[in-house]
Amino acid sequence: TTPTAAAPGTLPQQNFDRFIVTYTNEAKQRKMLRDGEWDAVRGIVDDIMDTVDVVSEALNVDTKFLHNTSTDDAVIQTSKTLNKNEAKEFMAKVASDPDVASVEPDYINYPAAEGDITFQFNDPQYSKQWNLTNPTTGVQNTGNARLRRGANVKVAVLDTGYVPHPDLVTGMANGYDFVSDPLSARDGDGRDPNPRDEGDYAPYNLCKDQANAHTSTWHGTSVAGIIGARGNNRMGIVGVADLARVQPVRVLGRCGGRTSDIADAIIWAAGGHVDGVPDNAYPAKIINMSIGTVTTCPAAYQRAINIARSKGAIVVAAAGNGNTEASKYAPANCMGVITVGATTKAGTRASFSNYGTRVNISAPGENILTLSMNSLDRPDNTKFSYDYESGTSMSAPHVSALLAQQLVNGTSMTTKQVEEAFTLAGGNRIKCDKYFCSRGIINSFNLAKQAGNLDANGRVTYLRPRKTIKVISKGLSAGASNTKIADDTGAPTEKNLTGVYDQVPDDRIPGAPAMEIPEDAQVYDLNGDAEPITQDEPLVTNPAQKPREVNEQ
């Protein structure tokens, strides 16, 4: 075997003072035949240290033997740290010893907590998502504030259901269809386990008080896309919490949705029991309701919301699109709900957005690029699209997703703590006074800091559980050691799009593909001191139409 030195040039660590030296099998066998196993190892070490001493003298450092590893490799230490170039020279010269198979740095590894990162998504439409990235009028959900991108936190979307958009479906969880009226449901029955959006197209006068004809909106898919459109998949857009698990709960059909159905759906989404419906095996932490009707809060809503909150769920509602007091719209006016108004790219209140003291926070809601379908009537899996949408319906999912991010595995946050942090976290008040926009535009960094997930300087404060894996540098020789990082704190796991390991329940939408890492997907150093590297390189880490809402004409 040709001796090699593992060059640290492409690795994130910058300075080195400990190295692992692997002996050749030939050297070990030769010494064992002559001296016995232990003496053989000591003999090889003595021989190698002669070479090391010569190398050290040339570099003006002292080097000492520390110990052998369990595989009889030698760990040596220099008296001063070496930079990358010095380390390369040192390892190359040590590797020239005929008894040496390879030399590699004894890398320093850390708990897999995110450091300061600038994560650049490869999704082609990401640059058009001002709502995420604009430093003054967006939610500023970038870098550390993304908090592991909401990985595996369940967010229920009570809406028109879903279509299997390829930029979303891999992250969706099993939901339920609560539309009890077969005419409105369009699927031939009432409540059933399939929450697919059948299209809310309705001809003139079909829906009585909604007499006007209207085309299908695919509203639920648009809302879900803002929350969980898959990021870094070289496709379309990025959701606010793009690794969250979106649970579609269908409550709206072509004639809107009944209060009784919606109330049952709230309870079910939070993990409560609803007669005649299988219990939700994976309850949601966040319930998004981008729906509304002009009425006082129905008692059925309030009871359901109280039950959901008692089970640890946070309920987020759109303020409504009537350009009036949000207190006139339900569920925005229900107690215990986080009510969200809409703002523009300029930082002003959107002209359609409801306002007033019932609004808790605002979020981008005008010209938001999200998922849709280019079909006027029935779902068509050849017509998935991306459209600009407006409405407080688009604002609410921004807040739902940012709240979900605070609950990722490793933060030890409860929904109650997150809700308390939300009430204290300031937003960006640009051109929108308190009466119209409450505390301003929700800010991802402010929320994460208030929740304690980021410190005052914006650095991550929690440790991220990660499965023990072997990371192999292709620059090493066949005889070189692998580097292990972090320890697993969980049970059986599945790899998601960024290589993060967490327990993922088997709750995917039937027929949805598993989440896999593409061959050309990028993996990012989490300490911010190395350029992005692809899987093919050495990988060692230290660690314009306003959407319609219920009963809207």
Image: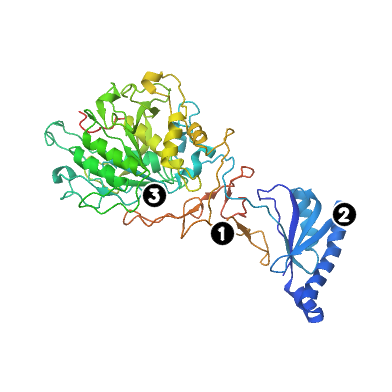
Q: Is residue 176 left or right of residue 170?
A: left
Spatial CA span between label 1 and label 3 = 23 Å
Who is closer to the viewer here, 321 or 294?
Answer: 294
Report x, y in % for residue 5: 73, 60
Q: Which sits earlier in the primary sequence, circle 2 or circle 1?
A: 2
Q: Which sits earlier in the primary sequence, circle 3 or circle 2?
A: 2
Query: Which label sits on residue 58?
Result: 2
The local crowd at label 2, few if under 14, some if 14 to 19, many if 20 or more residues have their Cα within 10 Å, is few
Query: Which label sits on residue 469?
Result: 1
Q: Please identify, in this view, whether the residue under mark 3 or under mark 2 is nearer the observer.
A: 3
Is residue 173 visible in the rendered structure shown here?
yes
- Of all residues, the one furthest to the front in this rendering is 310
Q: Is residue 236 left or right of residue 358?
A: right
The local crowd at label 1, few if under 14, some if 14 to 19, many if 20 or more residues have their Cα within 10 Å, is some
Residue wearing tag 3:
171
Q: Which amino acid type is marked by label 1?
A: Ile
Is residue 162 visible in the rendered structure shown here?
no
